[in-house]
Amino acid sequence: MEYIFNHDGKIQHSCGATLPKGAIKVTGWNGTPGEPWEWYKKGIRISDDELVADGLRKDYRGTYYDQDKQEHKINALDKEPEPTWTKENWSHNTDVLDLETMTWKEDAKAKSKFENAILRGKRASEFSQFDKYQLPLLWANLTESQQTEYTEWRNAWLNAPETKIQPERPVWFQR
């Protein structure tokens, strides 16, 4: 005879000639020994969806993000995520995870640093094309007005990370 019984709150499975006190007779039982006893009704396993709905089991499945914005997927129902993971996805490169509220908040310092890096990259691109006017021979061929415009443009780019203004190229610049 095949039967299951409650042993310290966990389900156990066995076979024998007599049915022990408190055991439930089963046929072709396909449960998992060691699972909580309350996951079974009359020897039949309750579905995971019912267990979650009844609050007997937690459903942690899904995608989580850690403080470094790395994605983690949990496919197992009971596998708990790390305490510093959140299901909320970050939306900006400059977001940081607020561990008290477990929400992403934009970090003003990181945002400023990120924007400055973009401006510096654009400035480097502009200077790689147009800093040729600093060469003595080319400089000498510029009119006084062009020299002034170039100097103002170059200084505006040098100050761009602080002013957050991308200067317009003078009209006479050639690509």
Image: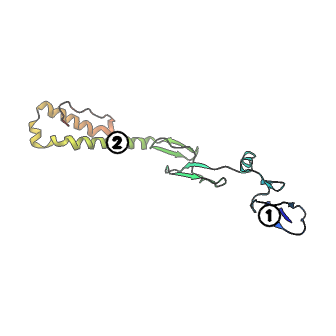
Could you tell me which quadrant the N terminus lies in? Answer: bottom right
Q: Nearer the viewer, residue 22 or 109?
A: 22
Q: Which percent across, then down, holds residue 49?
A: 71, 47
Disc 1 is placed on an element classified as strand
Q: Which percent across, then down, holds residue 92?
A: 46, 41
- Residue designated by label 1: 12
- Which class describes the residues within 10 Å of circle 1: few (<14), some (14-19), or many (20+)? some
- Residue designated by label 2: 118
- The numbered dot on residue 120 is none
The Cα–Cα distance between marks 2 and 1, rounded to whole angstroms, is 63 Å
Q: Which percent across, then down, holds residue 149?
A: 18, 32
Query: Residue visible at 77% across and 51% down?
Result: 46
Query: Residue visible at 50% across and 51% down?
Result: 70
- Which class describes the residues within 10 Å of circle 2: few (<14), some (14-19), or many (20+)? few
Query: Residue visible at 73% across and 45% down?
Result: 53
Answer above or below: position of 51 versus 1: above
Residue type at mark 1 is: Gln
